[in-house]
Image (spheres, rainbow, N blue to C red):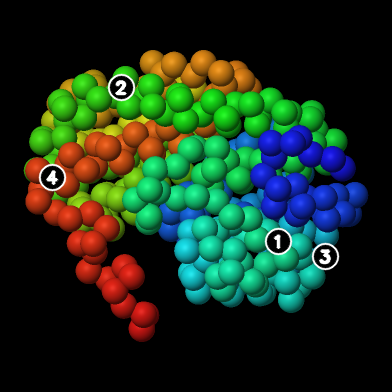
Amino acid sequence: MSFPERYHPAVSAALSSIDFGALRHVYFVACGGSLSIMHPAKFMLDQHSSLPSDVFNAAEFVARAPKRLGPDTLVVLCSMTGTTKETTAAAKFAKEKGASTIGLTVEPESPLGTAVDYPVKFEAPYTTGVPIDAKDSNYSAIYQIVIGIAAATGGEDLRESLIGSLYNLQAAIDRAQETYAPLWDRYAEHFAKQDVIYTMASGASYGAAYSFAICVLMEMQWINSQAIHSNEFFHGPFEVLDETRCFVLMKGIDSTRALDERADEFLHRFGKAENILVLDAAKLDLSGIDERFQGNVVPLIFFDTLWRFIYKVADFRQQVMLDGRRYMKKLTDY
């Protein structure tokens, strides 16, 4: 199976080595922020392939030990630094069961990179501080894996369309920064005063809401948070809503948009507009991105642009971002 010239070379090499005729299941495995990209990856695979898949926290993947795991399965893992011990253990566990393993990391020579069959390098500005092009991100790499799998297992071959879209993604992110900038000015100071901020989304964007809640609001600003699925909101969590509660709602443009619209209407019906920050993907200029992938790239745009917002919040709170963490990267004995 040949791959487009602009495909990530490590992804092309990995997928060219897998026996797709025998492949029966895919597992997406990681922790924390890396786990958040597995949700949109599964969403995309469900859209374009009949191949079944699951998303697992790495430690639970090993503890649960799915009976389905074996030589006819592919396990896709991710750890930004490649040093996440649970994810490395999951890679080793999967290989012991005979599964093929692909590991996404910024450091191919890291423990995860050396534990998997096929390491795939991506770039990440959040740890280096160096801006990147979105086509080199973890989202880009895992989407190339997913669409490659779909093409190899009987789905429509959309690899060229995906690559073209990914090469136009950074420009769309830059335009989104301008679109959302007035929101940052309007909400940053008020949100900086909050002890609790909930995040909401559905579909491809749920992972972005999850990551923003646990890895940004809680990890870096010590603001209590919870990622709430836009439909699950109506099955219990909506009882916390009043005119004082703050929410970040990510309204996507994939097939689940109606779920976000329902949540948006309810939030504004019983909440207060100044406490409800809505990022609406329908307002974005996504020129150059294939319509079939626009809903899939939106979560990366949401998360990338929210980093600018959270730095404004951090300035008002006088709370340092990465270096201000108490435990993350400071302790090793847990």
Q: Residue at x 16, y 27 (%)?
A: 185
Alpha carbon distance from label 3 to label 1: 15 Å
Type of amino acid at the residue the image marks with label 3: Pro
- Across and down, in percent, residue 176 comes to 37, 24
Alpha carbon distance from label 3 to label 2: 48 Å
Q: Which residue is mark 1?
A: 118
Alpha carbon distance from label 4 to label 3: 50 Å
Report crowding for label 2: few under 14, some 14 to 19, many 20 or more residues within 10 A (C-alpha): few
Residue nearer the viewer, 252 or 236:
252
Report crowding for label 1: few under 14, some 14 to 19, many 20 or more residues within 10 A (C-alpha): many
Q: Earlier in the sequence, mark 3 or mark 1?
A: 3
Query: Element type at marker 1?
Result: strand
Q: Residue at x 69, y 36 (%)?
A: 6
Report crowding for label 3: few under 14, some 14 to 19, many 20 or more residues within 10 A (C-alpha): some
Q: Which residue is mark 3?
A: 71
Left or right: 196 in relation to 298: left
Q: In this rendering, which labeled residue sits more in front, label 3 or label 2? A: 2
Q: Earlier in the sequence, mark 4 or mark 3?
A: 3
Q: Which residue is mark 2?
A: 178
- Above or below, 170 relative to 138: above
Type of amino acid at the residue the image marks with label 4: Asp
- Above or below, 243 relative to 96: above
Q: Which residue is mark 4?
A: 315
Q: Earlier in the sequence, mark 2 or mark 1?
A: 1
Badges 3 and 1: C-beta atoms under 8 Å apart? no
Query: Element type at marker 3?
Result: loop
- The quadrant of the rendering that contains the N terminus is top right
Residue 305 visible to the viewer: yes
Q: Earlier in the sequence, mark 2 or mark 4?
A: 2
Type of amino acid at the residue the image marks with label 2: Glu
Query: Element type at marker 4?
Result: helix
Type of amino acid at the residue the image marks with label 1: Tyr
